[in-house]
Image (cartoon, grey):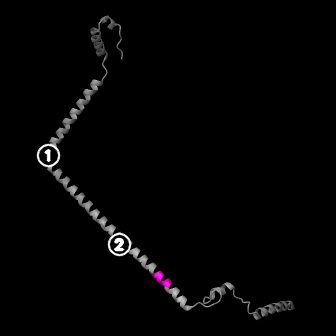
Amino acid sequence: EDEGLGEEDASKQGRIAYIDANEDITLVSTHDEQMFDVDQDLDGEELNEEVALKLHAELQAEFDKEQRLTAERAQQKVEDNIALIESWYDVQAKIDADYQLAERLQAEEQHELNDEDKDKLFMQLLKKRRKFFAAKRAEEKRNKAPTQAQQRKIMCTYLKNMEGKKLTDLKNKSFDS
């Protein structure tokens, strides 16, 4: 059993020696090489430090400009909100002043109406109510249908005024409504 293991080890030792001898073969992934070769571009040439500094300065200037614009916009929004709040406070103050004035005027009116005026107004109200209900009762009487006796009387008057009709004609009529 030991000899079998030894032969296996010998074959592996040969491949490892071949890999070590070949410089193109590496044990590191090619993705890792691209990641760690930051100072080389795709062709393997080194980047120029001046170009990198110039690019960095341009990016920093653009970033600073964006931050300045963002800060200005935020400041403008804050100023707009402050102006809106101040105008709202002014409107609210006017509303409060109008409300207090209305309350004061109502209190003065109530104070001016003394007991005599209140009694006079109450009597006028009662008088108007009496007139209203009297008119309503009179209208109901006018719109009420005539009774049987009233119908007979109306018909009798009608027949007296008509030529060629006699009171005997009235006796044959029925007055059921």
Task: Give how far apart the Cα atoms at labels 1 and 2 are.
Answer: 57 Å
Pair 1/2: label in front: 2
Mark 2: give few (<14), some (14-19) or many (20+) Cα within 10 Å: few
Tag 2 or tag 1, which sits nearer the N-term? 2
Q: Which three-letter amino acid code belongs to the residue tagged 2?
A: Glu
Residue positioned 35% across, 72% down in the render = 79
Residue holding disc 1: 115
Q: Split into 4 quadrants, where in the image is the C terminus?
A: top left
Instruction: Give the side of residue 168 with respect to residue 100, left or right.
Output: right
Instruction: Give the side of residue 130 with respect to residue 164, left or right.
Output: left
x and y percentages locating residue 136 in the rendered image: 26, 30
Give the label on residue 79, or none: 2
Give the label on residue 167, or none: none
- Magenta span includes 61: yes
Region in magenta: 58-64
Residue positioned 19% across, 54% down in the render = 105
- Depth order, front residue of 88/79: 79
- Depth order, front residue of 70/6: 70
Relative vertical location of residue 44 with respect to residue 70 in this rendering, above or below: below
x and y percentages locating residue 124 in the rendered image: 17, 38
Q: Which three-letter amino acid code belongs to the residue tagged 1?
A: Asp
Residue positioned 52% across, 89% down in the render = 53
Mark 1: give few (<14), some (14-19) or many (20+) Cα within 10 Å: few
